[in-house]
Amino acid sequence: MEKIDDFMNHLPVHVIFGEGKIEQLAEIMEADGLKKAFLVIDKGLEEIIPEIKSAVSKLNVVKYEKEPGEPTISNVEQIAEELKKSNADVVIAIGGGSVIDSAKAARLSITQNQKLSEFIKSDKEYVKPEISLITVPTTAGTGSEVSGGAVITDTTTNVKVGLANPLIRAQYAIVDPVLTYGLPKSITAYTGIDAVAQAIAAVMAKVRTPIGNAVALEAIRLSKESLAAVVKNGKDKNARSNMACASLMAGLAMNISDCTAEHSLGQAIGGMYHLPHGLTVGLVLAETMERERKHIPELMERIADALGEAEDGSKDGSRAVRAIKRIIAEIDIPVLRDVGVKEEDIKTLADRTMEDFFITQSPVPWTRDEVLTAFESAYQLTDRGMKVNV
């Protein structure tokens, strides 16, 4: 029997979950004495999701519509300039993880009284923000609505920069499954596999805790029950609700614990090829788990149980890898060759992976050769093998 290591957890985010909860935006502002909102929102979202338009219409708000794409330093600095001019006392972020991360980073920039590019190069002494933050996700994946982190792309180097501190967190997270009903199949799949990966990583990470494990394993179970179902049928409201909850819980688990190598490999790909974050993590999730199971088979067995994979007597964690490969196939995650990754870039990707923070949180340190092996294994795939069209 292992001794439980010392740990501390503090996640002061007020979570409001349920269908139609976006209508509480105005009363949240009123209850907290907030008068003027600066809204960062995916461009065109209000016009296609009437529930958002209805809730926003009740607010005193200055809007910034973000163009599609991963958040960049230059875009965040532009948002920060508009936020400063707005004199708003609350930032509201409505959209996917890119919008929420952009809003977090812009508020951080204003709080620190520095351009983001300057803050990244500084000693990063975080100051408590005076402006409140309310996050409203419209995807079920990143968990950014409750996390104390943001990932921003530096387009001058094509490297993704991670920011992490409890002071980045939102004060309120409104998680309304209704806002995810119209998500396209690909976005549902990419954001969903990111949620699964975050939950799995929270169980594997060297900084895992019993509380984090409990939250993460339930997130994994919910994802197993609902991800393939909602990719197959986006109108399945129960599956949408389950994935919204799984994503929220995965975000919490990630903050109680951390992400691991799958995010480092994925972020290296995303930085170089400008691909969606969830997709890049899904491209290498099975390969990183294959390596980790050799070091933490007992934890992988718990993950396999949460994934509902039948016992086979192996006790080596291979069940978990097999279950993930099946889910990835079921939701049509492509392979590295399909998304334009070049074999000659693999060594550079490995170098960038080794420089990323998340790989340092893996249960046992990775070598560069192991990273190369993971990338090469993923690159050898021409399809998913167990592919099931949904």
Image (cartoon, rainbow, N blue to C red):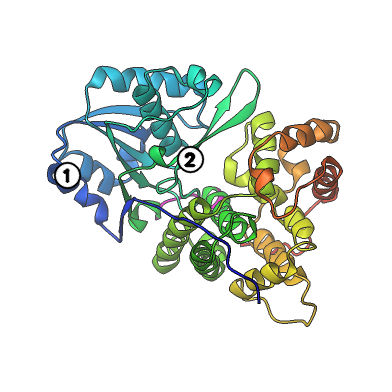
* In-front residue for pair 239/286: 286
Nearer to us: label 2 or label 1? 2
- Can residue 342 be seen here? The reply is no
Residue shown at 78%/32% (left/top)?
A: 351
Q: Magenta part of the protein: which range?
A: 181-186
Q: Earlier in the sequence, mark 2 or mark 1?
A: 1
Q: Viewed as shown, does residue 318 lie left or right of 153? A: right
Q: Which residue is more in the foreground, 4 or 256?
A: 4
Q: Is residue 82 above or below residue 101?
A: above
Nearest to the observer: residue 178 or residue 250: 250
Residue 26's disc number: 1
Which of the 4 quarters of the picture holds residue 291?
bottom right
Q: Can residue 118 be seen in this view?
A: yes
**330 horizontally vs 220: left or right:** right
Kindly identify which residue carries mark 2: 149
Q: Is residue 340 magenta?
A: no
Q: Which residue is drawn at 80% across and 78% down?
A: 314
